[in-house]
Image: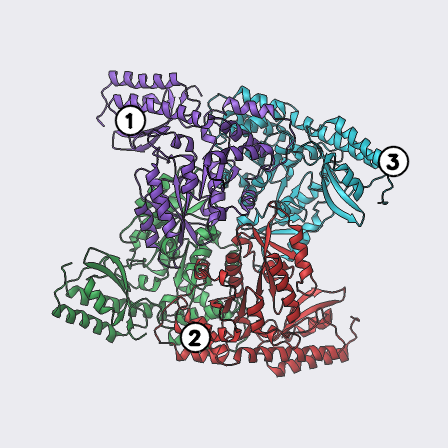
Chain colours: A green, B red, C purple, D cyan
Amino acid sequence: MSVYQFLNDYSEGAHPAILELLAQTNLDQEIGYGEDRFCLEAASLIKARLENPQSAVHFASGGTQANQVTLAALMKPYESVIAAQTAHISVHEAGAIEATGHKINTVETLDGKLDPEKIQRVVAEHTDEHMVKPRVVFVSHSTEVGTVYRRGELEAIAETCREIGLYLYLDGARLGCGLTSPQSDLTLPDLARLTDVFYIGGTKNGAMLGEAIVINNPALQTDFRYHLKQRGALFAKGRLLGIQFLALFRDDLYFDLARHANRLAAKLAEGLAEQGFRFLTAPASNQIFPILPDPLIAELQEQYGFYTWARVDAEHSAARLVTSWATQEAKVDEFVEAVKMFGANKVYPQS
Amino acid sequence: MSVYQFLNDYSEGAHPAILELLAQTNLDQEIGYGEDRFCLEAASLIKARLENPQSAVHFASGGTQANQVTLAALMKPYESVIAAQTAHISVHEAGAIEATGHKINTVETLDGKLDPEKIQRVVAEHTDEHMVKPRVVFVSHSTEVGTVYRRGELEAIAETCREIGLYLYLDGARLGCGLTSPQSDLTLPDLARLTDVFYIGGTKNGAMLGEAIVINNPALQTDFRYHLKQRGALFAKGRLLGIQFLALFRDDLYFDLARHANRLAAKLAEGLAEQGFRFLTAPASNQIFPILPDPLIAELQEQYGFYTWARVDAEHSAARLVTSWATQEAKVDEFVEAVKMFGANKVYPQS
Amino acid sequence: MSVYQFLNDYSEGAHPAILELLAQTNLDQEIGYGEDRFCLEAASLIKARLENPQSAVHFASGGTQANQVTLAALMKPYESVIAAQTAHISVHEAGAIEATGHKINTVETLDGKLDPEKIQRVVAEHTDEHMVKPRVVFVSHSTEVGTVYRRGELEAIAETCREIGLYLYLDGARLGCGLTSPQSDLTLPDLARLTDVFYIGGTKNGAMLGEAIVINNPALQTDFRYHLKQRGALFAKGRLLGIQFLALFRDDLYFDLARHANRLAAKLAEGLAEQGFRFLTAPASNQIFPILPDPLIAELQEQYGFYTWARVDAEHSAARLVTSWATQEAKVDEFVEAVKMFGANKVYPQS
Amino acid sequence: MSVYQFLNDYSEGAHPAILELLAQTNLDQEIGYGEDRFCLEAASLIKARLENPQSAVHFASGGTQANQVTLAALMKPYESVIAAQTAHISVHEAGAIEATGHKINTVETLDGKLDPEKIQRVVAEHTDEHMVKPRVVFVSHSTEVGTVYRRGELEAIAETCREIGLYLYLDGARLGCGLTSPQSDLTLPDLARLTDVFYIGGTKNGAMLGEAIVINNPALQTDFRYHLKQRGALFAKGRLLGIQFLALFRDDLYFDLARHANRLAAKLAEGLAEQGFRFLTAPASNQIFPILPDPLIAELQEQYGFYTWARVDAEHSAARLVTSWATQEAKVDEFVEAVKMFGANKVYPQS
C-alpha cells in the first residue's frame, strides 16, 4: 500500500518485543491448549495488576471470538444482552451473538455509551415470558466511536446492574487506549471490581492476535475452558497468546503502546481543531472522527488511508482517523500539514 | 518440562523460517481480515499446487474452528455429517459441531477410516423427515489413529458421495504427514479433485497456528467469509496466517517438515517392532500406537512424555507416540535404546 | 372471568363447526404427522383459493412456531430478516428467531408497516461480511398494531425484494381480518403471487390452534417437513390441524368469522370516535387502539378486559380493544354505552 | 384406510370424554398461554397424584417439543445428554436436540434401557474440556421398544445420577402404558421422587395432542415458561391442553385407557406366542415386536397396518404391533385368527 494508513490500529504486525520473545522461547517444549507456563505467567502478571485475587484469566484469538464465547457463557437460551446500537457485537460481528441463540437489545446513543437510565428502560420494557429477558449489559471502553467512560459512569452502571441482577461485561478491544485516555480515570482494578467479565485487547494494542478474558465473578469461572474449546478458542499452541501477553505485561509495554497511540491521535485532533474543524464525537482516544468537507476527504485519501465514517450533511462527512502503537509521528505531522495546505488553497463549504 | 515430549506435534513453536518472515514483514502496512498481500500470495501458491483453478483458499486459526466453520456452512439445519466414531469432530471438539445445530452420525471403525459401504449403510438407515438427513461425509487424512487413505479408497468414497448427493469433506489437521506417508499415494491435486472441501493443517506441521481451508466445489464458495466472520475466524491481522503459509508453501518446506516427522515415527516404530512389540493400528504417519506392557509404559513415562491411549488387555496398553517437524532424531534413538534396555532387564507380560 | 373480554382474539375455544367435524371424524383411523386425508383435503381447498398451483401447504400449531420454522428454513447462518420494530418476531416471541441463530434488523415505524425505502436503507447499510446479510423481509397483515397493507403497497415491497434478491415472508396470524378489512384490497391470490411464503392464521380466527404455512416459491418447498419435524411442528395426530382448516375452508367460514370480528371492531371504533376519541393507528381490522383518559381506562377495566397498550401523554394512554369471531355484538354496544355514560358524568382531561 | 391399523397409538382422534369437555367449555372466556383455569386445575390434579408438592406442571404439544424444550433448559452449551441408541431423541426427532446445540451420547442396548454401569462408562470417557460434559440422563418408560423399567432399576439409575451430578429426565410419551404394565411396579410418585423432570404423554394415550411436563427439581423450575415460549410451546389457546388433561386426570381415565391398550397388546402377544412365535423384546406394554416369517408379514399387511421393524434373519423380520385406548378387541381376535389360519395353510421358515 503506497498511501500511509490511518485506517485502523491493525495495519502492522506485532511490537518487536513480542517477536523477540516468540523467537527466544520457540523450541521450548510446552503443554498445549493454554496451560503452558507462558500463559500461566502472563495470567499471573495480569492478575497482579487487577488487585482482585478472585479473577481468572483466559486467552482468546480476537474480539469477535472473545465476545461470542463470553456472552454465550453468560446467558440462558432466552436471555439477551443490552448494548448501544453502535456496539461491535450488534453491527460488526456478522451476527456472531445471535448465532449462539441470543438477542441483542440495542439502545440509541450518539456517543456509543450506555447509562443507568438507558439500561433501566430496556429492562422495564421486558415484562414477561413472551419477550426475551435481559441478562447482560455490554459496554466497550474505549467505545466503537472513540469515547471513554469515567469511573463514576461505570460505577453507576455497575450499581444498576447489581440492583437489577444483570451481568456487566466490558469489551476491551481498545482497552489500552481507553485506560490511558486523558479523558478517563478508570483503572484495571476498577474494571476488576466493577465488571463481571471484561477483556484486555491485544490485537489492536501491539499483539499479533490475542485478547485476555478476565472473569471477575467467581460464579462465571466454572467450566469456562469448555466454552472456549467449543467455539474454537483453545489453541494447540496456546503459548502464542501467553507469550504475547507476557511481553506486554512483564513491564508497562501494554500501556506505553496505548499512550503512544493516544498522544498521536490527540496531536491529529489538535491540528484539525486548529484549522476549525469539528468532530462527530469529542476526541478521547486513538480513534477520532473529524467532520471534513467531502472534497478535502477525497484529496487526503489520495495520500492517506482512512474511512469515511458517516455523512453529516450534503457537503461534509465524518472521517475516522485511527492511530496505533506503530503510527509514525512524522506522518501525523505531514497529515496536519496537508490539511493546512489544502485549506490555504481551497475554499471549502463551511461545516 | 524436563522429560522429552512425544506427547503431540504441537509442543514447540513455529519453524524458524516462519518467525523470520514474520519479522521481515512486521512493519509493512497491510489491509486486515485476510485480504492482505501475504494471504493472497499464500493462497495463490497453494492453488498452484492443487491443479484446480476453481478452488478457493481461506485461512482459519485451528482445526476445531476450521471444522466448525466449514461444516456449518455445508449443511441446512436438519442435515447431518457422517464420521468415524474416532473422528475429532465427534470426540474432541467439545460438541462444536452440535453447537452449530447438527448431528454427527458416527460409524464404528477400528482404523479410523470410512468406506463406501459404511457410508451407504448410514444413508440407508435415514429414510424420512423424522430423522436427520445425512449430507456431508467427514474423513481425516491422516486419521486420528495415524492411518492414511490410499487414492483408490478416497476415490471410492468420492464416487459414493457423488452418487448419493453427499459432500465430501477432509480434515487435514495432519495432512502433511498423510500426504508424505509411504503408505499413501494421495496428492494435493487428488484432494482438489475428489473432495468438496478440505483443509491443510498448519498448526501441527510447523506453523504457530493456522489451517488453510480449500473449497473446491464452486457452489460452496459463495459468502464463505461471512461464515468465517460469524464464528470468529476472520482476524484483524490475518497476515499472521498468510505469512505462515507463505513460508510453508513458497518452497517444499511444508512437505519437508512432514517427511521429517514421518521418518522419525517410522524409526520409532521399527525400533519397537524389532523388540517384538505390536501396534494398535499399522504405523503409517507421525502418530504410532505401540502396545506395551504397563510397567514399561510407566518406566518410559519418567523420561518421555506420551499418552497412554487405550487399554488392550489386563497387562498391556497402547501408547501414542507422536513426532513432529521439531522432533530430534537423537531423542528417538535414545527412546528405542531405553526400550531395549528395559527389555533386557525385565521380563514383561507377553503381548 | 366475570368481566367481558376485549383482551384478545383467543379468549374462547373453537368455532362450533370445527368441534363438530372433530367429533364426526374422531374414530376414523388415519396416518399420522400431517399426511392424513383431512390435511390433504384442507391443503387442497386452500390451494384452490390461491390460484397458484405451485404453492405447497403445511400446518403448524401456532404463530411463533410458524415463524420460527419458516424463517430458519429461509436463511443461511449469517443471513438476517428485516422487520418493523413492532413485529411479533422481534418483540413477542422470546427470541425464537435469534434462538435459531439469526439477527432481526428492525426498522422504526409508527404504523407497523414496511415500505421499499425502509427495506432499501437496511440493505444499503449492510455492506460486507463483517455484518449480517439481510435475506428475508418480514411483514404482517394485519399488523401487530391493527393496520393493513393495500395491494399496491405489497406489490411495491415484493418488487423491491425481487430486485434486491430478498425473500418476502408474510405473517398472517390475523390474515382473515387483514384480507376482509375494508381498508385493504389484498386477496389470497395476491399473497400467493407476491410472497415467497406466508401463513394463514387459524388460532386467532376461529380454530383451536393451527396455522397454514403456504410456500409459493418452489425452491423453498424442498424438505420443509424436516424443518417442521426438527422444531416440534409435526404432530402425531396432525389430523387435528387438517380437520380445523377443512372446516374453515370448505365454505367461506374463515372469511365470515373475520368479517364478524372486523365489523364489531369498526362498531367499537365508531362509537368511540363519536365520543371524540382519537386512535393511535387508524382502525382497520379487529384490533383498535383508542386513546383514552387514564381514569376512563381504569373505570372501563372494572367491567371489560383489555390491555393498556402505550402511554400517550401524562393523562392519556392508548388502549387495545380486540374483537373476534366470538365477540358478542351486545357487549360491543354495552361498551360504547359505558363510555358514553362515563363521559356524561365525568370531566376527563382533553386528549 | 381400509385395513385395520396396529400401526401406532395415534391413528384415531381423542377419547370422547375429551371432546365433550372441549364442547362444554368452548365459549368460556379464558386467559391465554396456559394460565387459564383448566390448565391450572389439570396441573393441580396431576400434582395431587405425584405426592410431591414441589413439582411444577407445564403443558406442551408433543413429545419432540417436550424433549426439545426440556433438554435445552437443562444443559449449558457444552453439556450433553446420555441416551440409549434407540432413544427417540437420537433417532426420530430430526436432530431436534442437536438443533439446540447439544450432543447426545448414545449407548448400545438391545432392550432400549440404560443402567448405572452404562451411564458411568459414558461419564468416565469424558475427562476434560476437549469433550462435551454429560449432564442429563434420558430414559423412556415405556421405551421405544416396548420395554419398561422396574422401580429398583430406576432407583439405581437415579442414585447414580445423584452421585455423579447428572439430571435424570424421563420421556413419558407412553407413560400410561409404562405405569400400568404388569411388568413394572413404578408409580407416578416414584417418578416425582426419582426424576428431575419427566413428562406424561397425552397424545399416545387418548388426547388429541399434549404432554404434561413435570419438573420435580425446584432449581429447574425458574423461568421455564420462557423456554416454552421461545420454542413455540406456549399456545394462545393453551386451554386446549389443560382441558384434555383435566378430562384424563379428574378420574382414572388416563390409566384406564392405558390398561386397555396393554391388555389388548398382551392378548395379541399371547395369541402369537401360542403359535410358537418369539419376540424381539419381551412383551411388556402396548408395543410388541413378534418375529414373523416374511411371507406371513406380507399376507397380514394386506389386512392390517403395522410396521416391519427390523430384519432378524434372511427369512424373518420383527413386526411392530401397537395397540391404543381405541383398539377394538374384536380386531385383535381377528388378527390372531388370521395368523392361525395362515399358519395352518402354509409352511413358513422356522424362526
> Element type at marker 3?
helix
Badge 2: residue crowd in 10 Å (few <14, some 14–19, many ≥20): some
> Element type at marker 1?
helix
- Which of D348 and A93 lies nearest the eye of the viewer? D348
Badges 3 and 1: C-beta atoms under 8 Å apart? no
Q: How many marks?
A: 3
Kind of residue at disc 3? Ala
Q: Is residue B60 above or below residue D41?
A: below
Give the quarter of the image for residue B80.
bottom right
**Residue C81 tag number:** none
What subunit carries mark 3? D
Q: Is residue B226 left or right of residue D283?
A: left
What subunit carries mark 1? C
Badge 1: residue crowd in 10 Å (few <14, some 14–19, many ≥20): many
Kind of residue at disc 2? Glu
Between disc 1 and disc 2, the foreground one is 2
**Residue C294 tag number:** 1
Query: Mark 1 and mark 2, same subunit?
Result: no
Q: CA distance from mark 1 to mark 2?
A: 70 Å
Q: Quadrant of the C terminus of chain B?
A: bottom right
Instruction: Please name the residue that numbered disc 3 is placed on.
Output: D344
Q: Is residue C9 left or right of residue D305?
A: left
Query: Mark 3 and mark 1, same subunit?
Result: no
In x, y percent, where is residue A257? 33, 70
Q: Quadrant of the N terminus of chain B?
A: bottom right
